[in-house]
Image: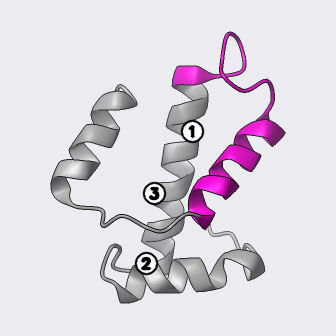
Amino acid sequence: MIMNVSLLQWTGWVERRVKNKEFSSASECVRHCIRVADAIERVSGPAGASFSSRAELEDILEAAFAAPATPLTAERKRRIASKAGL
């Protein structure tokens, strides 16, 4: 399925990640973000989670994305996947 999604407020963030070679394309970056959000929701989901709703999770993720970026090295990807139970 192909979807057109407006990311106006995130365009610069995604473009910087691609330019810094953290991702090979904007699509890869967005897919990664969706997978991370899904993993967080599945592992920490609203029941017993440190957030009570999807909106609160989105606020947490938005704040995280506003912070300075840390390079996404292979080791960092492995640690993130491990923490997410993937």
Quadrant for residue 53, please give it.
Answer: top right
| Amino acid type, label 2 | Arg
In this rendering, does residue 86 appear at all?
no
* Residue that carries the numbered disc 3 in the rendered image: 32
* Residue that carries the numbered disc 1 in the rendered image: 38
Quadrant for residue 71, please give it.
Answer: bottom left
Say which mark, if any, is on residue 17. Answer: 2
Q: How is the image coloured?
A: one colour
**Residue ID at (71%, 12%):** 47
Tell which circle, 3 or 1, labels the residue nearer the N-terminal end. 3
Residue 19 at x, y = what percent?
38, 89
By secondary structure, the bulk of the magenta-drawn segment is best described as helix
- The crowd level at tag 3 (other Cα within 10 Å; few <14, some 14-19, many 20+) is few
Frontmost of labels 2 and 3 is 2
Residue 12 at x, y = what percent?
60, 85
- The crowd level at tag 1 (other Cα within 10 Å; few <14, some 14-19, many 20+) is some
C-alpha gap between disc 3 and disc 1: 10 Å
User: What are the residue bounds of the magenta stretch?
Assistant: 43-66
Residue 44 at x, y = what percent?
57, 22
Indicate left or right for 49 with 13 as reference: right
**Residue ID at (50%, 73%):** 27
In this rendering, does residue 54 appear at all?
yes
| Element assignment for label 3 | helix
| Amino acid type, label 3 | His
| Amino acid type, label 1 | Asp
Indicate left or right for 83 with 10 as reference: left
C-alpha gap between disc 2 and disc 3: 12 Å
| Disc 2 and disc 3 in contact, CB within 8 angstroms | no
**Residue ID at (49%, 47%):** 35
| Element assignment for label 2 | helix
Tell which circle, 2 or 1, labels the residue nearer the N-terminal end. 2
